[in-house]
Amino acid sequence: MIVNLAERAHNHNWRLDPIIRSLLDTDFYKLLMLQFVWKHFPAVEVCFTLQNRTVSFSLAERIGEEEIRAQLDYVRRLRFHKSELIWLAGNTFYGTRGIFEPGFLEWLDKDFELPDYELSMEGGELSLSFRGLWTQTTLWEIYALSILSELKTRAGLRGMSEFSLDILYARAKSNLWEKIARLRGVPGLKVADFGTRRRHSFLWQEYVVKAMRDTLGEAFTGSSNTYLAYKHDLEAIGTNAHEIPMALAAMAETDEELRESQYRMLELWQATYKRDLLVLLPDTYGTTQFLEGAPDWVADWTEAMDRQWFRSGAICWCKGRPHTH
């Protein structure tokens, strides 16, 4: 079914229109990293702080604190559904079945719960932090970014007539089709969706993903959004992010431990996922220094690069207590 995006954006007559409706509505790599943390660092406490790096755009001036709290509170009440956990347990990811351990899935079912948040408006800017066990806190990153991105969208659309919204989405669809048309038929093309954290809205991301699936065929390899992969029978794409080497570096107590932490992370990752998900991010603290000290076995890994519009994963420890950057 094709959603009438203009009508949906215009008709907000309900008390709350949840942005995150499933805990699977996150990047797939967050679940892989969560299992990694659950396995190796279950007692580590952290603090995630969201920082808006676009100083010319004030989130506090565009989005009301009450709106943000309502969305965050809704997400805190969510739990993984049995059908979602069965899909994680039985589905094949990267050609391998059983990537998620039974004990981990049982923990998600019985014990996982998002911790509380700290939200304030300071000096015209929004301050949002999450403190707690790393295992409980890490998933907040994508939920928070998706919520703020869509609330920013809603603020921008507020006051537009349904006709104006209809024209807006018609033009967006036309632009989307032009881009897809340029991609069709490109030899050897492989395209995946990684748009969750900075999406216009969940419905628009879903529309784009379905459009690419229906028109690009095998050239469209899947989505990093786990819920969309689950709902539309797509490949879930993603491995790991800068968060893990950042965290291990923060836990290092000597210069030698600091230098070796980036390689220790890879050893632990390889022990967890064998040869299925060997993707590394050498640019966490500079690719040059990483390659200069890298052991020979790193050559078996695939290099990946990542760039973010929001910085949301800064973690630091001091004598076992979380601090923010």
Image (cartoon, helix red, strand yellow):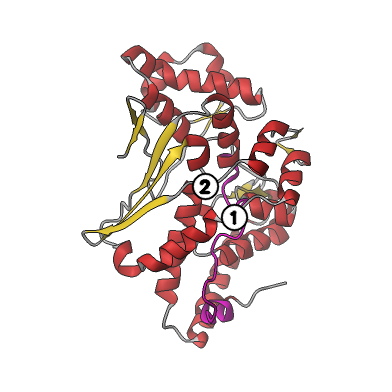
Left or right: residue 314 compared with residue 25: left
Residue picked out by circle 1: 78
Residue 324 in the image: x percent, y percent?
31, 39
Residue at x 33% of width, y 49% of height: 51
Q: Answer whether residue 171 is magenta in the image.
A: no
Other-residue count near label 1 (Cα within 10 Å), few / some / many at <14 / 14–19 / ≥20: some
Residue placed under numbered mark 2 in the picture: 114
- The answer to whether the residue labelled 1 contacts the one labelled 2, judged by CB atoms less than 8 Å apart, is yes
Which residue sits at x=60%, y=47%?
A: 224
Q: Quadrant of residue 181?
A: bottom right
Camera-nearest residue between 302 and 23: 23
Is residue 85 visible in the rendered image? The answer is: yes
45 or 263, which is in the foreground?
45
Q: How many marks?
A: 2
Up-down relation of residue 244 to residue 292 (above or below) = below
State which region is magenta: 6-29
